[in-house]
Image (cartoon, helix red, strand yellow):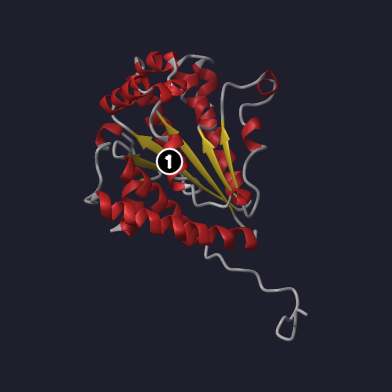
Amino acid sequence: MAKKLYDRLIAKPGKRVRLKDWDPEDTFGWEIEEARDRTEKNIEKIFALQNVLAAESRHAVLVVLQAMDAGGKDGTIRKVMRGLNPQGCKVMSFKAPTAEELAHDFLWRVHKVCPAKGEIGIFNRSHYEDVLIVRVREMVPKRAWSKRYELINAFEHLLAANGTTIRKFYLHIGKDEQKQRLEERLADPQKHWKFNLGDLKERELWGDYMAAFEEAIERCSTEDAPWFVIPANQKWFRDLAVSQVLLDTLESLDLKYPEPEADLSGVVVK
């Protein structure tokens, strides 16, 4: 069943995307305990493969996480990526661009923090903000952001051609689920720091964001860099789904430890 998740979650390149056709409550028949057990096993295998990835140093892996506010990006990193060796893993979070970043093209700040060969990079939000919030909030005219889909595809093709395997995850929650999660933040003083009044204004634009996500996924899910729509109302299933796709991805790279530079059969450590 786990092997089929990859194919069931992928937004197939060239196919129309309508998020209303994806149920954020869906768990594809998985039960919670079975899913949690599989997730733990996946995390162990991912850690082992990360070691080989670093030793071989032929591939890089880039994980892109996008979602509405309270969609679970931080939770996914905390739960799924907790087994990774931090020496070979970088997490980048993209905030409002600085003056220096605004003086360059919109991909400049992204390209310079992409993972090197042997590393896993995780983007908490990403270059897709430039066709999401920038579009919805009309921060630049349509003639500017509408050109960015092709630029993003070309950028990701460049990364792929140079050994970076890209997997992009849209964590799909429902509007009612977002309301519940935001209310939980309000009710818990220890989570007040995560509550932003601006989130309520973004929530009012839910329909506009769904349209922006649909177009971004539809136009930028490619063979080089596919999008996966992850039903994320159930956090335990979200963790299973992301860990399974990441594990399948690493296994597909056919990673191998490099051969030693010299014959070690007669070496004795004294």
Residue 229 percent across, percent down from the top left: 36, 40
Q: Is residue 108 in sight in this rendering?
A: yes
Residue 137 percent across, percent down from the top left: 46, 15
Which image quarter: residue 188?
A: top left
Q: Nearer the viewer, residue 84 or 124?
A: 84
Question: Which corner quadrant holds the C terminus?
Answer: bottom right
- The residue positioned 52% from the left and 19% from the top of the image is 143
- The residue positioned 28% from the left and 36% from the top of the image is 24
In the current view of this chain or complex, which residue is farthest to the right?
Answer: 270
Question: Which corner quadrant holds the N terminus?
Answer: bottom left
- The residue positioned 75% from the left and 77% from the top of the image is 262
- The residue positioned 40% from the left and 44% from the top of the image is 13
Counting other residues with Cα less than 10 Å from the Cα at mark 1, is it few (<14), some (14-19), or many (20 or more)? many
Relative to residue 148, is residue 82 depicted above or below? Answer: below
Residue 168 percent across, percent down from the top left: 46, 42
Q: Secondary structure at mark 1?
A: helix
Q: Which residue is mark 1?
A: 76
Relative to residue 81, is residue 93 depicted above or below? Answer: above
Residue 215 percent across, percent down from the top left: 40, 30
Q: Nearer the viewer, residue 205 or 131?
A: 205
**Residue type indicated by callout 1:** Thr
